[in-house]
Image (spheres, helix red, strand yellow):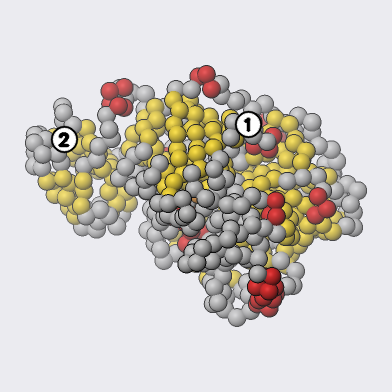
Amino acid sequence: MKNHFFLLLLLIIGSKSYSQNALFVPDTLSGTNFVLTMHEDSVQFFPGNKSHTYAFNGNHYLGPTLFFQQGSNVNIVVHNQISDTTTVHWHGIHVPAIWDGGPYSEIMPGDSWNPQFTIMDHAAMYWYHPHPDTKTAKQAIKGAAGLIIVRDPIEAALILPRQYGVDDIPLVVQSQQYDSLNQALPRGMQDSTLLVNGTLNPFLNVPSQIVRLRLLNASGERTFNFGFSGNMSFHQIGSDGGLLDVPYLTNRVRLGPGERAEVLLNLSSMNGQTFYLMSYASELTMGVQGGPTMPMPLGYPNMNSPLNGVDFNILQLHVGAQTAQPILSIPSVLIANNLLNPANANCTRTIRFTADSAMVMDGPFYFNDSTFNMERIDYQIPINNIEIWKLINETMVAHPFHIHDVQFYLMDRNGALPVEGERGRKDVVLVPPGDSVTFITQFTDYADSLMPYMYHCHILMHEDDGMMGQFVVMPASVGVNELNKPYTNVCAYPNPTINFTTIKTPSGIGEYQLNVENMIGQLVYSIIGNQEEQFLNTTEWPRGMYFIKIHNSRYRQSVKIIVR
Ligand code: C2O
Ligand code: CU
Ligand code: CU
């Protein structure tokens, strides 16, 4: 075992350049009109072959950081210039379902997409990344991701570091596996290459004052147990979707894939010193990806990485002179989080994380024993519902559970109050094997009975393998009877289609009205029919997604079709 480990280390040192590189800090875009062009690129990470990448705008890896002001109406044009279908999802941002960028919002190669929404989120760091059905890992690990920083008046009134790239630094941390041709592997469970903002072996100069780091774990599967060398303490001030009530003095923040945290470091007395952002992975429990590797029976996939279960450096920080107007103290109070009252909950849902057998380590994993099905809506949630979701992990590995549309508050972990760093707004929660976690949330503002939001594991290959579900938020105008009816789809085939599709209605339907609406609700076609099989010629329809709605006095049914 030991020999094996040293051999791996030698291989890594042998194949990868150990020169230090200045940390890349993505450029920024602000205002209300944004253009994001996703393109193919390449980066010379290693000697030999360049690594094929996806990036946005002028970058070779990752995209610009978008600054959104709470209350503003943003208009984003996303151009797809890669040779594959994609989508762009605004992770953590509260948007109408049609602009959420989930697997339904496909942008074909060469096409554009124009989401428009009002920023209602709290000041925090969010991110955007592709979310196409079964292809998220493949695209995201090539670097197709970027950050979003939301500002709001409450955060703006606090004395906090806010000079982007100077004393307020975004850190996108990824661990990746590259093959012998230097290409990123979407299912790389032997990931040993660390990238921060796409920089290999990075260092950063920071001023000797209060410095704010915004951490995102954008890895496909690895969890980091972030801390700093020498067990230096710091204040965590924010979680995924907002600030905490008060700064939390600690020396660790554990982040699973998709999770974020904001921390403040007091470097006032450290001018001239060098220290490291680290992962204290030796403290992770078994089953959490990145913790000690489980002994695996013969025939199981190799999940060994030299980073598993050991403490390692991620980013070197050199402390230098102070800036002109340094922030030198940490506020004692931040914001007032309004926790929802569990007594007001309209319903509790239980989601068990399952697999085909208790021994499965690499998937597929399921929610409540069923795999993701685009034709099945898992939950219809009445608008404004306050809900408690109980997550129970019955598998051998940890899963970072993520839900779109909302931020939630953790109520407990295994019956105990979560640590202070997890008491703020969150959209991802890591659930280790055997654990159960409950959270409370409310589904406000946006209802759409046809367009679903996703919830899924943020380990990208688990998500792509079907550890995902979808819910619709139902408008108040839909009666209770309607809500209790199972959601019924009519069939359309072929779907996706190019030239035509046939709609198969329930037998004996009688006369019905068939309406076709596009993504933004415009009626594009309408017909009165009575055939059980209705032929639609789609040749002239612009590419995109359409809702086909059929109704008469007895039926109300719909189906989404994609025209390519
Ligand atoms: Cu960050 Cu549904 O994803
Ligand atoms: Cu998301
Ligand atoms: Cu998972």
- Label number found at residue 212: none
**Please, is residue 102 above or below residue 478 in the view?**
below
Q: Is residue 555 left or right of residue 348?
A: left
Compare residues 347 and 335 and report the one nearer the observer: 347
Q: Is residue 101 left or right of residue 340?
A: left
Q: Does residue 368 appear in this view?
A: yes
Q: Position of residue 227 (x, y in %)?
A: 74, 50
Q: CA distance from mark 2 to mark 1?
A: 54 Å
Q: Residue at x 55, y 56 (%)?
A: 221
Picture quarter containing residue 333? top right
Q: Position of residue 390 (x, y in %)?
A: 49, 33
**Please, is residue 464 above or below residue 446 in the view?**
below
Q: Position of residue 427 (x, y in %)?
A: 55, 40
Q: Position of residue 253 (x, y in %)?
A: 69, 45
- Identify the residue under disc 2: 513
Ranked by sequence position, the earlier of labels 2 and 1 is 1
Is label 2 in contact with label 1 (beta carbons under 8 Å)? no
Q: Residue at x 63, y 75 (%)?
A: 46
Q: Does residue 468 appear in this view?
A: no
Q: Which-is-in-front pick, marks 2 and 1?
A: 1
Q: Is residue 92 left or right of residue 103?
A: right
Circle 1 sits in a helix, a strand or a loop, which is it? Answer: loop
Outermost residue, front direction? 297
| Callout count | 2
- Quarter of the picture holding the N terminus: bottom right
For label 2, count other residues whose C-alpha is less than 10 Å away and answer few (under 14), some (14-19) or many (20+): some
- Label number found at residue 416: 1
